[in-house]
Image: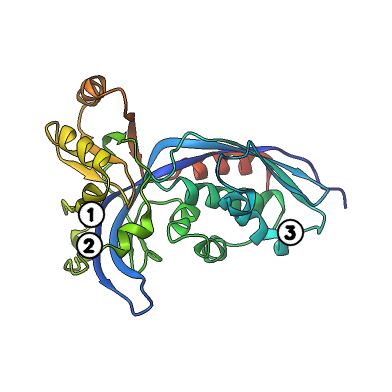
Amino acid sequence: MEHPITTLTLPSPAKINRFLHIVGKKENGYHLLETLFQFINVFDTIEFSPNIDDCIRISPQIDDLPVSDNLIFKAAELLRPYRSEPNLGVDIILTKRLPMGAGIGGGSSNAATTLLALNHLWQCNLSPDKLASIGLSLGADVPIFIHGKSAFAEGVGEILTFVEPKTPIYLLVKPNAHVNTGQIFTDKRLTRDTSTIKMSHVLTLDGHNDCLDVVRALYPEVNEAYLWLKKQGDVKLTGTGACLFIEFKHIKDAERVKQELPKKWQAWICNGCNTSLTHQVLDQWIAKNGN
């Protein structure tokens, strides 16, 4: 059958970890954690245009990242067996704004956005749980982006309980560093014995990030930014990356601090979002186009 060629353009948003506690380590080396994920309205944009020549093409190519290692390509490859027609491919244009190595989930978000988009464009008709299961092989954070709701995560990050935390204004700051997650999790200074918390405390806990001190010790640029921002408020690290954030009640306060920031650091003023922008736009597209 002839497949309709419909372009779908989706935002691929970042996330922050409002806290990240390492509570143990499994025999296979994976760390047990507790974290509170929340989306923010800072995002890449990805345009998907189906083709009928069975090719997956991504442009522009990211420097120092072979296409075969791109999580967008890997996600599309994983959906190939589920296509409604065997000759379906896709042309993908990525507008990249989210820095890599920042701890804000850019690669995982891109992978999840690809799975969500192609599930519709290729008429795979897979459930969110099935997509999340597929996405987990690409990264522990991919399922949260598939489901598109703020969540408390346990285990290695795969056990999700959806929650509705407050949605404040954040100042997000990216120092000049690309943090290697593997390096953080293998560092002997990383504590792995933080006490577990009760579900009833998730939204009221003023938690911390157990990776902060290790990242500061290994990356002087992050430490410099942390010490500068600490004078402005309660500064936290997100994920196992380089980005730091402060929560504000009033946007004018966030704007003041951003204006005073050293120009060598990237910075965004953004809002917490309990529903991913990907899902908001995709739901509108489905309502208009069906499937």
Residue 81 vertical placement versus 97 (above, below): below
Where is residue 92 shown, x and y percent of the image? Answer: 66, 41
The residues tagged by marks 1 and 2 sit, at their Cα atoms, a distance apart of 6 Å
The residues tagged by marks 2 and 3 sit, at their Cα atoms, a distance apart of 43 Å
Q: Earlier in the sequence, mark 3 or mark 1?
A: 3
Q: Earlier in the sequence, mark 1 or mark 2?
A: 2
Crowdedness of circle 1 by 10 Å Cα count: few (<14), some, many (20+)? some
Crowdedness of circle 3 by 10 Å Cα count: few (<14), some, many (20+)? some
> Which residue is the site of mark 3?
83
Picture colour scheme: rainbow
> Which residue is the site of mark 1?
214
- The answer to the question of whether label 1 and label 2 lie on touching residues, with beta carbons closer than 8 A, is yes
Crowdedness of circle 2 by 10 Å Cα count: few (<14), some, many (20+)? some
Say the numbered circle drawn on residue 29. none
The amino acid at mark 3 is Arg
Residue found 19% across the figure and 64% down from its top:
191
Would residue 93 appear left or right of 55 to someone viewing this image?
A: left
Residue found 38% across the figure and 52% down from its top:
180
> Which residue is the site of mark 2?
190
Where is residue 16 shown, x and y percent of the image? Answer: 33, 46
Q: Secondary structure at mark 3?
A: loop
Where is residue 194 shown, x and y percent of the image? Answer: 17, 66
Question: Closer to the camera, 173 or 277?
Answer: 173
The residues tagged by marks 3 and 1 sit, at their Cα atoms, a distance apart of 44 Å
The amino acid at mark 1 is Val
- The answer to the question of whether label 3 and label 1 lie on touching residues, with beta carbons closer than 8 A, is no
